[in-house]
Amino acid sequence: MRDADRLYRFLFEHTAIRGNLVYLDATWRAIRDAHPYPAAVRALLGEALAAVPLLAATIKLEGALILQVQGTGPIRTLVVQTTHDQKVRGLARWSGEVASAGTLPDLFGTGHLALTIERRDGRPYQGIVPLEEDRLAGAIERYFRDSEQLPTRLWLAADEERVAGLLLQRLPSPERDDEDWRRIGMLAETLTPAELTGQSSTNLLYRLFNEERVRLFEPEPVAFRCGCSRGRIATTLKMLGAAEVESIIAEQGAVEVTCEFCNRLYRFDAVDIGQLFAADTRHAPPPGQH
């Protein structure tokens, strides 16, 4: 599909309202297929993956934006991340039976949603809201209302092949534009999940806002990138220490580590571990040397 794995930004001319629209196809399938997610978990993970590029596009970001939902219910953790260059990844953890559908509190129990911005040149910023809304979109809208004071609306949808999302945001303006915000919001309220995942960007925006003056910008690619590597796993093993890792080798014959994000297996046998720690031994000073 022409809009596959693309993020679109648009503006409503002569108003202080902007929008973002995202479609994830191959990106979604790569993340969806990493684990056998129950239907409700898969749907929420898909919605969260659509949300993070939309949110990142509203800020000047050099680093990463992380959306995390944690609770005491059947779904324990959901975490998704996007970088400033729109590389996304995500996973969810659950326990026991998960209902095929339900509200956010039904599926997560008591918990919270956190949005964290990790900038390359500064300390992380985090905002947290309780899980009291029925939908993930509603919880994110509450975050913007309570933490950012920016009226924001979200529509998120996920099916087997595609996830998609639409964001509208009212920007600070010296002129009151309450009527514009209400009108455009009412038009967007007619959007159905099937339309969101099934319509092209141009058709969707025309269907919703054909009486508005909308400026659509060139799309930006979005892609799945896990970030794991054999080198990073090796660094983690070195932090455990030679004695701990060698005890695993003695018991199991090899160290196997599976990345939770992409399900890739990394295997280190006795020779690999010997080489890993031999490099440290060669550079270590002899006893008594200072």
Image (spheres, helix red, strand yellow):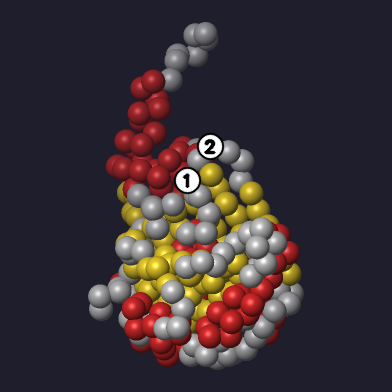
**Residue 7: where, in percent of width, then height?**
38, 66
Q: Quadrant of residue 246?
A: top left
Q: Quick check: marks 2 and 1 in contact, CB under 8 Å?
A: yes
Query: Residue visible at 44% across and 53% down?
Result: 83
Residue type at mark 2?
Answer: Asp
Q: CA distance from mark 2 to mark 1?
A: 8 Å
Nearest to N terminus: mark 2 or mark 1 = 1
Crowdedness of circle 1 by 10 Å Cα count: few (<14), some, many (20+)?
Answer: some
- Asked if 233 appears above or below 161 in the picture, the reply is above
Mark 2 falls on what kind of element?
loop
Residue type at mark 1?
Answer: Glu
Q: Which residue is mark 1?
A: 62
Question: Which one is nearer the viewer's eye here, 229 or 161?
Answer: 161
Question: Which one is nearer the viewer's eye here, 83 or 238?
Answer: 83
Where is the N terminus found, in terms of image quarters? bottom left
Residue 183 visible at all: yes
- Side of 159 relative to 77 (left or right): left
Q: Quadrant of residue 88?
A: bottom left
Query: Residue visible at 40% across and 45% down?
Result: 232
- Side of 16 relative to 260 (left or right): right
**Residue 5: where, in percent of width, then height?**
33, 69
**Residue 278: where, in percent of width, then height?**
35, 30
- Asked if 261 appears above or below 159 in the picture, the reply is above
- Asked if 62 appears above or below 77 in the picture, the reply is above
**Residue 222: where, in percent of width, then height?**
35, 63
Query: Residue visible at 34% across and 83% down?
Result: 203
Q: Which mark is residue 104?
A: none
Q: Quadrant of residue 122?
A: top right
Crowdedness of circle 2 by 10 Å Cα count: few (<14), some, many (20+)?
Answer: few
Mark 1 falls on what kind of element?
loop
